[in-house]
Amino acid sequence: MKYASVFLAAALAVAMSGPAAFAQAAPTTTKLPAPLQLKPASNAPLTLHMNDDSKVIYEAIGKAAGIDVLFDSDYVSKHIQFDLTKASLTDALRIVGLTSNTFYKPINKDTIFVASDTRAKHTDLDDRVDHTFYLHNVSQAYEANEIHTAIRNLLPPDTKTYLVPSQNAIVVSATDEQLARAERLINELDRAKKAYRLTYTVTETDAGKPVSTEHFVLNATDGQEETLKQGSKIPIITGSYNAVATDSKSAGAETQYTYLDVGMNFDATLTSMGDRAMLKSSLEQSSVSPEASGVGPQEPILLHTALKGTYVLTGGKPLALGTIDIPHSTRQLDISVAMEPLQ
């Protein structure tokens, strides 16, 4: 849900803003073709209040801005109500197009061509270009898939897009303006994730007196699960069988083993929240009991304790997570964690 809401907000922002200048550098290896830009004789804000045919309104806008307006031979004028106050030329053309179900295409710096907004007309008039956008800050397959989905939702249904997972790239076949919109959305979504340093401090006490202190440090990236393990592997007999004699060994009983991890395991997922972060943490401590299992000489009893929870961290302020009692002793493990943002 987090990604879905971020992508929707970014897509809406790009869709509403039009072909404005980009806020940051494009994440591509080649220069994106620049769409043809209108250069009207006047950039004064437009104010029009008309109840007339769309063709007449287009011509009024063109006259006010100092541009020529040409119409497709199949163009059908539609009677519309048009109210505009202090709007730019781009906004005026966009609004009359949405209202009359038409679209325009610049054919030079001071002339536009207007046609009905149909797939057939777009196929005839739109100049499509294939362009590859490379994603630099995604590390999981689902992140690239979600960016690709956001691009498809932003662009018209007949626009062709392809995700190339092996190259972390999205190929888009679209018009120059559509490519510009796709680039702006990718710039919004393909941002470097925040990174943090998490320091877990485990203090062992015996009857309330400090015995030792250990620090476990891991680096965490926003939204990704990180794991740190420290301990030993304990062999456990799982069975035995009678081996058949071969040229390299004689017949006899063979024992099968498996190995269990004992020690400290840390799993952490940080989610950025402005100057704070939400930590989903799981800490597990396991050890071998001094008591025998009674099953056999190689089957120990393993002691296991888990400490799990969700916490809100502030940079530089340690937070106590809890205390783990060590069975069959007077010892305890007091555990805290501190977060430090990485530049």
Image (cartoon, helix red, strand yellow):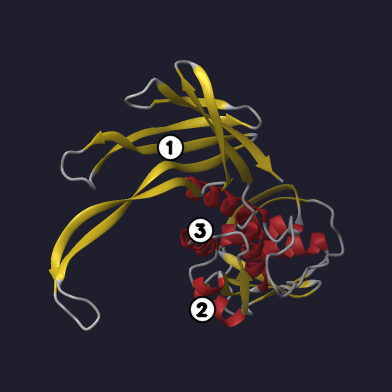
For the residue pair 60 and 214, the one nearer the viewer reads as: 214
* Label annotation for residue 143: 3
* Residue to which mark 2 is pinned: 120
CA gap between label 1 and label 3 equals: 27 Å
Q: Position of residue 250 (x, y in %)?
A: 18, 75
- Label 1 or label 3, whichever lies nearer to me, is 1
Q: Is residue 247 left or right of residue 318?
A: left
CA gap between label 2 and label 3 equals: 34 Å
CA gap between label 2 and label 1 equals: 60 Å
Can residue 161 be seen at all in this image of the molecule?
no
Q: For the point 54% across and 48% down, which residue is it?
A: 6
Look at label 1 and name its amino acid.
Answer: Leu
Name the outermost residue toward the right. 41
For the residue pair 131 and 292, the one nearer the viewer reads as: 292
Q: Residues within 10 Å of mark 3 (few under 14, many from 20)?
A: some
Residue 341: image quadrant is top right
For the residue pair 150 and 78, the one nearer the viewer reads as: 150
* Residue to which mark 1 is pinned: 283
Q: Position of residue 267 (x, y in %)?
A: 45, 43
Can residue 232 be seen at all in this image of the molecule?
yes
Asked whether disc 2 touches disc 3, contact meaning CB atoms under 8 Å apart, the reply is no
Look at label 3 and name its amino acid.
Answer: Glu
Look at label 2 and name its amino acid.
Answer: Ala
Q: Which comes sooner in the sequence, label 2 or label 1? A: 2
Q: Which comes sooner in the sequence, label 1 or label 3? A: 3
Q: For the point 81% across and 73% down, which residue is it?
A: 109
Q: Secondary structure at mark 2?
A: helix
Residue 172: image quadrant is bottom right
Q: Secondary structure at mark 1?
A: strand
For the residue pair 22 and 343, the one nearer the viewer reads as: 343
Q: Which comes sooner in the sequence, label 2 or label 3? A: 2
Asked whether disc 2 touches disc 1, contact meaning CB atoms under 8 Å apart, the reply is no
